[in-house]
């Protein structure tokens, strides 16, 4: 299996805590976060990762090199910020398989990869990984009918619900209609129209989920991921 990891963001919300490295390299219990994420992907059966880089790219590529934890690693570096969609579109040009898992480089997700791969193989529809959380205010919500997504609700709705965990499985050419090196959002510019015109499925994970992008959750990750 093959994955794209989006690791090119500035990490502005975390800059007050970690200023000298890109956000995916922020130390968690003495290890760069991205080491924990890539190690997890290797354990789950991935053989190749395309790292999408931007800000301080050399600090990431210099650390991991061409191979880490049994993973073959390819680097794609954006010259200017491309957003989640543009970064995925560019990284997909370096992918070798017909479908790809897309992960955020600042989010740990203990994903049931075998079940998700099975769901993809059954119908080959785009899949958004969802996660139930106690409060969806910060994230927005997924509105679903069975295993099909019907709409995306905006952020600001309090209370428990199903959120987009920032992980996707798509055909490698799913974003081919967008020009390479054009900034766009995979959520707003691809998934929202795709939900309106075709089938986009949800896979609800029950695994550990934490986004280290804000100081409070970064602090929590120090203990939650210490033994990962």
Image (spheres, rainbow, N blue to C red):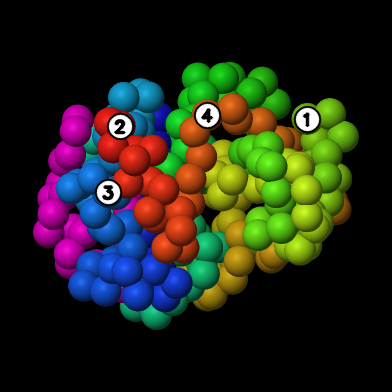
Residue 100 visible here: no
Badge 1: residue crowd in 10 Å (few <14, some 14–19, many ≥20):
few
Q: Mark 1 points at which residue?
A: 147
**Residue 144, horizontal then vertical, whole percent:** 83, 39
How far apart are labels 3 and 2 at the CA level?
A: 10 Å
Sequence-first tag of 1 and 2 = 1
Q: Does the magenta stretch include residue 52?
A: yes
Contact? badges 4 and 2 (CB < 8 Å): no
- Asked which quadrant contains residue 185, the reply is bottom right
Looking at this view, name the residue that lies furthest to the bottom: 80
Q: Name the residue under label 4.
A: 207
Contact? badges 1 and 4 (CB < 8 Å): no
Q: Name the residue under label 2.
A: 228
**Circle nearer the viewer, 4 or 3:** 3
Contact? badges 4 and 3 (CB < 8 Å): no
Q: Name the residue under label 3.
A: 28
Contact? badges 3 and 2 (CB < 8 Å): no
Residue 162 lies left or right of residue 111; in this view the side is right
Q: Which residue is drawn at 46% across and 54% down?
A: 217
Under tag 3, what secondary structure?
A: strand
**Circle nearer the viewer, 1 or 2:** 2
**Residue 227, horizontal then vertical, whole percent:** 27, 31
């Amino acid at each position: 299996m093959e994955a794209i990891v989006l690791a090119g963001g500035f990490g502005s919300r975390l800059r007050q805590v970690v200023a000298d490295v890109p956000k995916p390299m922020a130390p968690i219990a003495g290890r760069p976060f991205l080491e924990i994420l890539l190690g997890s992907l290797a354990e789950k059966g991935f053989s190749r990762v395309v790292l999408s880089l931007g800000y301080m790219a050399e600090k990431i590529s210099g650390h991991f090199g061409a191979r880490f934890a049994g993973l073959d690693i390819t680097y794609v570096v954006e010259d200017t910020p491309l957003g989640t969609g543009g970064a995925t579109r560019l990284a997909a040009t370096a992918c070798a398989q017909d479908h790809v898992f897309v992960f955020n480089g600042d989010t740990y997700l203990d994903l049931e990869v075998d079940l998700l791969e099975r769901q993809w193989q059954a119908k080959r529809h785009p899949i958004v990984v969802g996660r139930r959380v106690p409060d969806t205010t910060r994230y927005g919500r997924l509105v679903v009918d069975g295993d099909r997504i019907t709409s995306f609700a905006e952020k600001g709705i309090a209370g428990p619900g199903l959120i987009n965990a920032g992980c996707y499985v798509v055909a490698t050419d799913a974003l081919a209609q967008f020009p390479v090196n054009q900034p766009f959002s995979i959520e707003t510019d691809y998934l929202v129209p795709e939900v309106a015109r075709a089938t986009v499925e949800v896979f609800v994970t029950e695994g550990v989920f934490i986004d280290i992008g804000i100081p409070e959750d970064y602090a929590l990750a120090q203990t939650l991921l210490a033994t990962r």
